[in-house]
Image (cartoon, grey):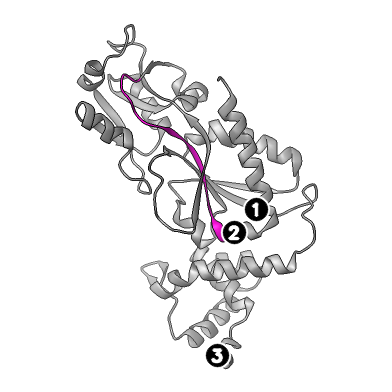
Amino acid sequence: MDLIRLSRISMKHLITLHVMLDTLSVTDCAQRLCVSPSSVSKTLSQLRDTLNDELFYRHGNRLVSTPLARRLGPTVHQMISDMNQIMTQEEFDVANYAGSFSLSMRESTFELIAVPLCEHVLKLAPNIRLDIWSKDNIGVGGLAKGVLDFIILPHDLSQPPNIDNNLVWENLFTDEMVCLMSHHHPLATQSLTIDDYLHYDHIGIVDNDLSVPFFEMQLAQQHRKRKVMVNVADFGVAATLCKNTELLFTCSKKWAEVAAQAQSLTMKELPFNYGQVGYSLVWYQPSMNDPALRWLYQQIITVGHTIGQANK
């Protein structure tokens, strides 16, 4: 162990690296840390010399992190989290807590979960700030980097992604899948059969963090593949496309019951076995050392269970 070399790295260096990995901007990093950009540049220069790595380099008009900087990200995040735990050993005071939390979810999940979650949390902790991102902007990788605290994600419960062994997936509630279609669709006034379902074209949902949905494989094995003619990133866009086309959209029943985009559509039960689906809470295991995050975790679980019991 090179103690002399280690002694040259302080928490200031680690925190600067942590925020730079998030912002990829010296100016934004300086604003977040309440220091001058020149101070951030000086700290980064010291860290570059100690680690013998550029850490960040300019590509066009933006900064890009080096492979070493990206590899250090999760470790640095954990070190900062551990130090924060040491510095804040006092009992967590919900009513007076003025920190912030960062969550990410699909835009389609906002109406279903974000609304009741915000109402519940802000009643208990009126001084906190919730930053809720679209998963299209910050995905699962943001957990290990410390950019996000939690992600809430609908998916096949039989197939949680194995992206990182330190990621924990906990089911909030199970759900059914339904087929949505326009009120003017030829199938809108009749029971949906498997032949009907496979005869028409479909809208699919793309998600780089998830593998091929289990229901797609189940459908292909038991019957045949459906014809997905349009792929979109979110439920709301898919529902909007359904209104003026004969495309079918397969989605979460609980979302379809509350989402404004789905209210003008006809809902049908799926005519095949699609496995078990639901919404999961995802977090980075080491972050649970923070009592504030443990508290928020409990609130999300409470809200999730309430949603799961609704309309049963």
The reply to whether the C-beta atoms of the residues labelled 1 and 2 are less than 8 Å apart is yes
In this rendered view, identify the residue nearer to me: 12 or 171: 171
The answer for how far apart the CA atoms under marks 3 and 1 are is: 33 Å
Residue drawn at x 50%, y 66% as measured from the top left: 74
Examine the rendered structure and indicate whether residue 234 appears above or below residue 263. below
Q: Quadrant of the C terminus?
A: top right
Q: Which residue is the site of mark 1?
A: 293
Examine the rendered structure and indicate whether residue 201 appears above or below residue 6. above
Q: Which residues are magenta?
A: 270-286
Residue drawn at x 43%, y 58% as measured from the top left: 164
Among numbered discs 2 and 3, the one appearing first in the sequence: 3
Q: Secondary structure at mark 1?
A: helix
Among numbered discs 3 and 1, the one appearing first in the sequence: 3
Among numbered discs 1 and 2, the one appearing first in the sequence: 2
Residue 159 visible within the image: yes
Residue 230 magenta:
no
Q: Which residue is the site of mark 3?
A: 5
